[in-house]
Structure formats: C-alpha cells, structure tokens
Image (cartoon, rainbow, N blue to C red):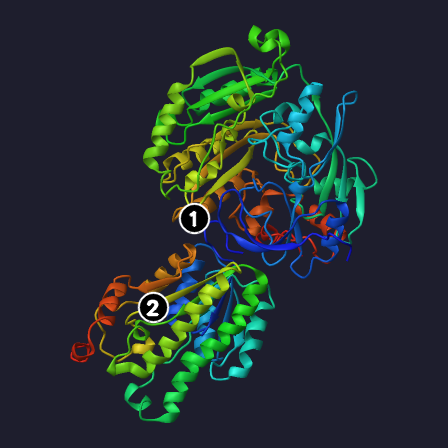
Amino acid sequence: MRSGTPTRRTTALHGWGRTAPTIAQLVTPRGVEDVAEAVRTAGERGVIARGLGRSYGDPAQNAGGVVLDMPGMDRIHTIDQGTGVADVDAGVSLDQLMRAALPHGLWVPVLPGTRQVTIGGAIGADVHGKNHHTKGSFGNHVEWLQLVTADGSVRELTPDGPDAKLFWATVGGMGLTGVITRARVRLHRTESAYFVVDTDRTDDLDGLLELLTDGSDDTYGYSAAWFDTTATGARLGRSVLTRGSLATVDQLPANLRCDPLKFDAPQLLSFPDAFPNGLINKLSVRAFSELWFRKAPRRQRGSVQNITAFYQVLDVFGGWNRVYGSKGFLQYQFVVPRGEETALRRIVERISQSPFDSALNVFKRFGAGNDAPLSFPTEGWTITVDFPITSGLSRFCTELDELVLATGGRLYLAKESRTSPEAFAAGYPRFDEWKAIRDAADPAGVFASDMSRRLKLTL
Amino acid sequence: MIDAVGNPQSILLLGGTSEIGLATVRAFASDRPMRVVLAARPGPRLDAARTELEALGCGVETVEFDAAQLDTHAEVVRTAFAGGDVDIAIVAFGLLGDNEKAWTDVEHAVELAQVNYTATVSTGVALAERFREQGHGSIVAISSVAGERARRSNFVYGSTKAGMDAFYTGLTEALREHGVTVTIVRPGFVHSKMTDGLDPAPLATTPQAVADVITDAVRKHKELVWAPAPMRFVMSALRHVPRPIFRKLPI
C-alpha cells in the first residue's frame, strides 16, 4: 500500500430529495491513481462516484459498497482563451468553472437549475438547461474525457474516436460505465455575465404553447416557464414565461458596463435543518402560486438580470431542500414528444386536479436529443414538479408514469427516485444498446449504485 | 432497494404462512408487486399463500424453514438472500401454546421458549449479518403486548415474547449505524387462526389492521409501534398497576 492511501469512512448518504438513505464506505480520492485503486479493490458491493449530491434520488449512493467523493479532485488544469476549451478534473463544480472562465470572456455552455453540480455529474446525467433548444445538453460540448473503467485502467474517450460508443454510453450513463476523472469542455464566448430578459404571463396552457411554437422561441438563447399547478379549469397551466439571451456590453446599463464580466450571484442565506413536515401543503402552495403569478409583469421587454435572478433562483438559498422537512420530497420530471400536446394537456390536468401540491414547476421546450442512448432530452416538452412525500403519492406517480409512457415520453434519471425497472426501460428504446456497451466494459458489475439495483440497470 | 416513497422491491417472510405476515406482504404489494421469499414448512397453506401472492403479480420463492431446527436458520437466511438484496425481512413465526400446559409440562414450555425466543434470536443474528453487509433495509419483528407485562393467563407465552422483544430492541440500536431499521410491532389480541376459539380481549384487531400499522411504520422508519395504537396507553398504564391490584383485574 502506498503511503497516504485514502481512508474509508462509513457514512449515510441520500440524494437532494432526502429520501431512502443508505450506508456506504466513502473514499475521497486525490487523483486518478486513487480512483483506479478504489475501483480495483471495490469488493462485492461495487463502487460509484458521487459529486455534490444534487441528484434527487439514489444514483450517487451505494448501499454496503464504496462511494467515491469526487469534489476533492477539483483542479482546473487549463482554460484556453484561444480555443475556448477548459481542461478540468471531474470534481470541479460548474460554479467554480464559471467563476474561472468569466474573466476570459467564456461561459459554461450548459447550466442546469443549480451551479452546484460537478463536471463528472453533468456528464453522467447529461444535464440540460434553459438553452437546450439552442445548444443541446452537456454531453454535446464535451470533446474528450478520461474514464477509469472496471479493470482499473484509465481510458481516454472522444465523441467520434475509436471508443465513441463508450463515450456516448458514459454521457447520461449515471456513472455506471466507469468513473469520469477529467474532461475537456468547449465553452462559449460572452461579453457579459448578464441576461437581457423578456417576460410574458400567459393565462392558460394554450397561451404558453402558442408562444413556444410561434417561432419566437428560437430567437432567444434561453427559455423556460414557471407554471401554476394549482390553477384548474380555464386557468389551467397559466404561466410566467421568461426568455433571454446573454447581454452584449452595449445592452447593459451604464453602471454595469465598467465590469460586465463580474460574477454577480450572491448566496443570501442558508436554511437550517429545522423545518417541520407538512409546511409545503395545499394552502402554502396555493398562496405561493398566486403570488408568483401576480408579481410577474404581464409583458416586459429587455430587462437586464443577473444569473440568479434569471436562471438559478434557488442557488440564492443554501439547503433549500430542507424546507420540505425530514420526510423529504421527490421531483418528477418527464418529457413528452412534440405532437403529443393533447396528452400533455391531460397530464397537466391530472396534476392540477390531484391532491398533491407542487410549487416549483418548470415547463420547457426541448430541441433535438443527442447520440447518448440514456440521454434524457428529446424533442418535445418537459415538465418538472416537486412533491413532498405523502401517502398516496406512490400510486399517483405510477399513474403519471403510464400517461407519460403512452405518449412515447420518458423520465429523467437525475431526478428519478421511485419508478419501476419496467417503466424506466419502456421510456428508453435504446436501453438494451446501452446495457450491451456497459456490460462489455464492466462484465463483473464493479460499478453499482442504489439506483442501478433499484432500476435493474446493471447485471 | 426501498424507493423514495417507501416501496420495497423484495420481502422475506419468516413464518411464510403467518396471517399478519401475509397481510403485510399484500399491503406492500398493493402499491407495487415485488419479489417475495416465503420461509415456512412445505404444505397446502404455503402453496395457497404462494398462489395468492402470484395472482397479485409478485414473484414468489419458497424456502423450507422449521423454527425448531436452530442449526438450519443461517442457511435459510443465506438462501433467501441468494436472489439479491432483501429490503424487508419480517420475523412473523411464533406459537401461542396452552398456558396451563406450558407451565406444568417441560416439553411444551421448552417448545414455546425455543420457537418464540431462541429461534427468533437465531434468525435475528443471521438477518443482522446480511443486512449489515448490504447497508440498507428493514427488519420487522412481530412481538406482542403480552411481553410488556406477563399475566397469569398467558405468562409462558408472555415471557418468551418479552425476551424476543428485548433482543430486537437491542438489535434496533446495534443496526442503526449500519443503515438498517428494526421495527418492533406489539399487537394486542388479533383475530386469527392462532387465537381461534379464544375470547377476544378489548381492542381486538385483525391481521389486515396490523399490516397497515406495519407498512406505515416501515415507511416512516418507526422503531416501535402498537396495534392498535391505543394499546400503547393501555399497556403503559397496566405496567404500573401495583401487583395486588393487577392480579385482580379481569384481564
């Protein structure tokens, strides 16, 4: 044993939804050799990598096995101003990368609802952002990655090289093809760290769909709506659509022009772990939804906003998942293909009529998907809702699964925490193809997670 | 794995023909069918249980299990885990016996003590080992209010349940740091084949009602529940009644 081998620490781990914790041996690697060593000595219950724990369910847990705590590997090797490519360790967070890239006039190409995601996690879940309709998902912007595979060897993969199949199986592969240790990501140029934002309030779902299909949506780099799940009848699906693009210096007000690339995203406060269960209920969700809808301008053009105001509102609050209390919550995110708007309407109706209340609801149009067999985004409509864990929720979600699958839609693994193996597989027609690539790379099943056991993704 | 909404994917029922045990499996299966391992003596009752659960969509395996054969228990548990993780194990076997016979007949007393206490300890140790390795899951031990304070009318049974209850209470603490929840269930009088022909006590309940208490407790990670819930207050009061008065109570 070489000196300084990382120790194993017995730890209870759960996802961002704070449900179904399990116990694992947590190992903090400091380099690719530590990762390879941990993979080679993983033992019967296997190993999985974990980033910042923002997946809602259990993909970064491994009951009885080893979990690699990747944020310890957080070196930014280079950011090439000429090519716009960042070469970074997998444990680097998007927040960290953004802060480092901005002074070069470079912007992280795909940002999900939080910047507290590692590069490895962003690739493993193939995350998407408000710009999916223009830029695709995270995997589209990775030009090289380093992967420690089941035999402890270090592989280098590119999207169209000899190992392209393993590359695309790793994108969206939830860490089950190996441990991503380093990647090169293409960044985008920007003149400022601000957005120019247009806001439209729509009175119903049809109004929202019209704005998203009249061609105007393609003129914005970024677009997503909040919608009200408590509104029914004629107001069903009423929403606040915010769309914007990165601002040029000319578009900024005078006071921001002197330092346009300043990273303007403070964390205002962090929530303590002292919230009771049941705080998110019919009354509070209704009140919040009414307020959120009313406070939005009916139509506003050209408002300049920083990243938290426009994009990552929840990053302002540390530990916001605690608001749901000790029982936790789940996020239900699905996509319904374009052309299935009637079915989509029925699903929105079903949610609004149900006794389950969700406040933070996102509606977004997806552009075309990529080559990764388990990548979630596909051309169509995606909806995200949050439900506190209450009795009866299980059956309701199973019902939603059936409605979603009937449209040819699917569920998102980074959010998933309760579906059946059959329902998951039914949404991903290329699942068998992914599994064949995975099983060839890891025939003994070294990589395993609570999610892979629950959804029968491996073995 | 037990998922975010508390649904298991596999259950091991030790005492595979127990009415409370089977009612609990059905209650979980009504939300989602799962893999069920029934550990019991072979026979028509086991066959009927298998058929019924298969009709609900469950995949059923059976393992031959005799509570009195202590040296086979480790192997029974090993076999049950051979097909993958067990999310919930229910220790549901036990004998009520005949109290008057039991305190006057060594053989009957020992039989009760072996099945209700020694065998639950022996399976408990084997279960604990496997659950510790897998780092997650729930063990449900079906105890009895009779173990809370032994009464003249069923003190042999009560004493065995008191021992079993104490063992699993300790196991709750020992396994907590390994990510495993142990839930002790203390039912009162339950209308079942075990109590057939006996006069029902106050607050008598049914296997289905006990099963609902158990599923709720497992989903909420509760470590001690009473069925029905008010039994907790009744027994809490009875435990503190002075002995001269206690022996005169019509219980």
Vertical side of A442 occupied by A330: above or below: above
Q: Which residue is mark 1?
A: A395
- Front disc: 1 or 2: 2
The chain identifier of the residue carrying mark 2 reads B
Q: Are marks 1 and 2 in one subunit?
A: no
Q: Quadrant location of the C terminus of chain A? A: bottom right
Q: Quadrant of residue A190?
A: top right
In this picture, residue A50 sits left or right of residue A153: left
The residue depicted at 67 percent of the width and 29 percent of the height is: A97
Residue A232 visible? no
Q: Which residue is mark 2?
A: B186
Q: CA distance from mark 1 to mark 2?
A: 29 Å
Vertical side of A344 occupied by B99: above or below: below
Q: Disc 2 marks which amino acid?
A: Arg
Vertical side of A251 occupied by A398: above or below: below
Give neighbour class at mark 2: few <14, some 14-19, many 20+ (Cα, 10 Å). many
Q: Position of residue A385 (x, y in %)?
A: 47, 35
In this picture, residue B229 sits left or right of residue A263: left
Residue placed most toward the observer, B169 or B85: B169
Give neighbour class at mark 1: few <14, some 14-19, many 20+ (Cα, 10 Å). some
The residue depicted at 54 percent of the width and 75 percent of the height is: B63
The chain identifier of the residue carrying mark 1 reads A
In this picture, residue A368 sits left or right of residue B45: right
The residue depicted at 49 percent of the width and 40 percent of the height is: A331
Q: Disc 1 marks which amino acid?
A: Arg
Q: Position of residue A302 (x, y in %)?
A: 53, 10
Q: Residue furthest front?
A: A3
Element class at badge 2: strand
The residue depicted at 58 percent of the width and 77 percent of the height is: B75
